[in-house]
Amino acid sequence: MDTLGSSFEILCKFNLLMKQNFSTKHDSFLPSGAKILGGAIGFIGIFAIIPNLILGLALLIGGVFAVCSDQGSDFKPKEKLYRYYIGIFGLHFGRWESYQNYPDMALLSKRMTTSSFSRTNRQTDQTETAHELYLLSSDHRKKILAFVYKNLATAEGSNPKLLAENLGVNYTIYSPKISEQTASKKRR
């Protein structure tokens, strides 16, 4: 983990000096079950090419997309642009937008729980914690996902302050402003 943090820090320093564009992969575009199904459909497509070329190619292309697709964020620090992308084979597709109105960056954690039930109605829960680095609007009400980390040590080892400096934003603690309407609800 220490090596990951130091290599990421070197990459950020290089990008900071060069102000180069960079990309971060968040996750695969489809869940693992859909990827397995897509792989099976692609495999069937290989054999379907012989009797029916069009159907076989359609199945093969759909299967390859399901297995090889991913999603993430691209950044252009010079122009202050970002995009969420869907990618396949290194090609990224998405619309570029400005992050000019997002002057802050913060590291947030979230817990995700998956529940499954057996036939006897017994419940099994699996809880995972994700650590994500977000660009934030000035009131911290709007967020842009920049990085996803598997654990807190990797997130802290990647030096988010250096990344914020690279993007030209401030690294801060997440503290959204509470509107008067929300504050009045709490007083009731």
Image (cartoon, rainbow, N blue to C red):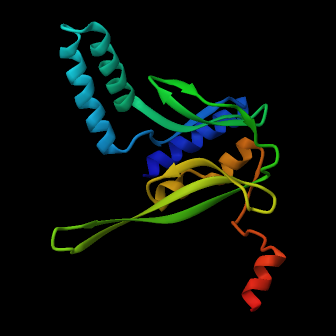
Q: Position of residue 44 (x, y in %)?
A: 20, 22
Q: Would you identify the image quadrant in which residue 116 lies?
A: bottom left
In the displayed structure image, the side of residue 54 where residue 1 appears, left or right: right
Figure label count: 0
Q: Position of residue 106 (x, y in %)?
A: 66, 59
Looking at this view, is 4 or 188 the one in front?
A: 188
Q: Residue furthest bottom?
A: 188
Looking at this view, is 11 or 47 the one in front?
A: 47
Looking at this view, is 63 or 130 the one in front?
A: 63
Q: Position of residue 72 (x, y in %)?
A: 54, 39
**Is 157 drawn above or below residue 99 in the view shown?**
below
Q: Residue at x 73, y 86 (%)?
A: 186
In the displayed structure image, the side of residue 24 where residue 79 appears, left or right: right
Q: Residue at x 39, y 26 (%)?
A: 65
Q: Would you identify the image quadrant in which residue 22 lies?
A: top right
Q: Residue at x 27, y 36 (%)?
A: 37
**Is 102 drawn above or below residue 13 in the view shown?**
below
- In the rendered view of the protein, which quadrant contains the C terminus? bottom right
In the displayed structure image, the side of residue 65 where residue 124 appears, left or right: left
Q: Position of residue 134 (x, y in %)?
A: 64, 53
Q: Residue at x 55, y 58 (%)?
A: 156
